[in-house]
Amino acid sequence: MKQYLNFFDFNHTVNYKTEILSGITVALALIPEAVAFALIAGLSPLTGLYAAFMVGLITSIFGGRPGMISGATGAIAVVIVTLAKSHGVEYIFATVILAGILQMMAGFLKLGKLMRLVPQPVILGFVNGLAIIIFTSQLIQFKDDTGNWISGVPFWVFFSLVALTILIIWGLPKITKAVPASLVAILTIFGIVAFTGIDTKTVGDIASIEGGFPPFNIPKIPFTWETLSIIFPYAAIVAGVGLIESLLTLNIIDEITQTRGRGNKEAVAQGIANIFSGLFSGMGGCAMIGQSLINITNGARVRLSGIIASVMLLVFVMFGAGLIEKVPMAALTGLMIMVSIGTFEWASLKTFKRFPKSDIFVMIVVTLITVFLHNLALAVLIGVIIAALVFAWDNAKRIRARKHIDENGVKHYEIYGPLFFGSVSVFNDKFDIKNDPKEVIIDFAESRVVDMSAIEALNKLTEQYLNEGKKLHLKHLGPDCRQLLKNAKDVIEVNVLEDPTYRIMANKINTNN
């Protein structure tokens, strides 16, 4: 039964059953992930679980993307593992708190809009790389405690349970969508193992999840500049990685749901969440694309599902550890494999013959860096840099000049394309200074002066014409271009003529006038 709910700042028609059941499913899927990421970081399992609860709860309430799930992530674990080994868990808590402060500052400064600079090929590469990571991370469940691949009966039992999980998640929605298929799959596998007594790996075989409410803890570290110099580099990377992964996940969920999240609000919420995570014995975290997709795929659309997931996670830790530790890992493995399949942008494989080669190259590079280095921030940064350089190179080659001499003997150069640092060399080659008439006009109606490199190029061009005893005028400069020239008045002087034509003089301003 659907009812209307005004939940905080987001109005939606809410299906309570879907939200609650999806939240429970997500909570079950969060447990092995949080435990695994904590162990990767060299921390206790409860440190990851407390982070998943605190970060998930706060971002679900205050975040900019209802339905998105946050918690302890592998990206954060990889960053802090070195610090955890060298200085211990108290320095991790302090680092997470400082990272949260930096994230809040980014949100207040509205830096979330910088995500507009991330091209589509970078997002596709990021998503595909993350899908591959999610899939390959499940393969460890097919190994025993010594790191060897299981074989024989144990393998086929585990494989069959995983396959059955995948079959239920794939097939049940074709019959009914009354309940989340992923939850039905988990309960089915749990029931089969419980009633038949099959010997298979469970959550409890990874680590115990039993604990109490997250304890409040002010990091026990010396509050000195030396300490700040130790934790600040890690905090800056944690903040950057967390924001990049969170805002990219937000964009992906936006596309799926055809709605629009608020990036700056999400950045502030992530910051608050990490501050509280550090104060309540958590390792910190950010948005989780896998669990977010589970939630969205189940039909959840508002904040309720995320809140239920966080609260139920804490309930499991405090009161239901004995039962949850009996959940077969095969069910959760099958669920995450289906998440990886759903995460991968299969349509991107069809674009190889349609996209420009540069875009394909960017997508592949981002995917490879994500998969092999597990450094999402570096992958996105390199992808953006490559895309920007390709864009600059392409635009540098596109600047053109159409030339003609009017009835008064004045030569006109009509410029097409932006004049900036990359196109200056091609721009200079367009002019025949020695053979041009006494008066020359450069028409920028179809172009614009972009940066100081362009200003300097015009200044030098003016000097060259002046040395030949010729006059150079600029025509049809836009307001932004004129402002740029005005700001550079210590280099050149601009006189506005009546036609309007703008004359650039090579003489620098006489500051005494």
Image (tube, rainbow, N blue to C red):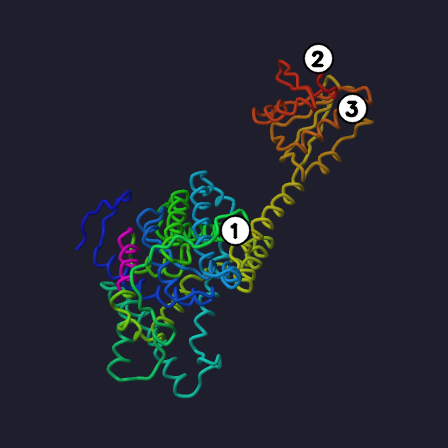
Residue 122 seen in the current view: no
In the foreground, 273 or 508: 273
Mark 2 and mark 1 in contact? Answer it, CB < 8 Å. no
Q: Judging from the image, what secondary structure is the residue with disc 3 in? A: helix
Rate crowding at label 3 as few (under 14), some (14 to 19) or many (20 or more) other CA atoms within 10 Å. many
x, y (%) of residue 28? 31, 66
Classify the position of the N terminus by image quarter.
bottom left
Of circles 2 and 1, the one toward us is 1
Amino acid type of disc 1?
Answer: Thr
Q: Tell me which label, 2 or 3, sits earlier in the chain.
A: 3
Q: Tell me which label, 3 or 1, sits earlier in the chain.
A: 1
Magenta span: 302-315
x, y (%) of residue 169? 32, 69
Q: Is residue 317 above or below residue 1?
A: below
Q: Judging from the image, what secondary structure is the residue with disc 2 in? A: loop
Q: Quadrant of residue 39?
A: bottom left
Residue 421 disc label: none
Q: Which residue is mark 3?
A: 465
Q: Which residue is mark 2?
A: 512
In the foreground, 433 or 21: 21
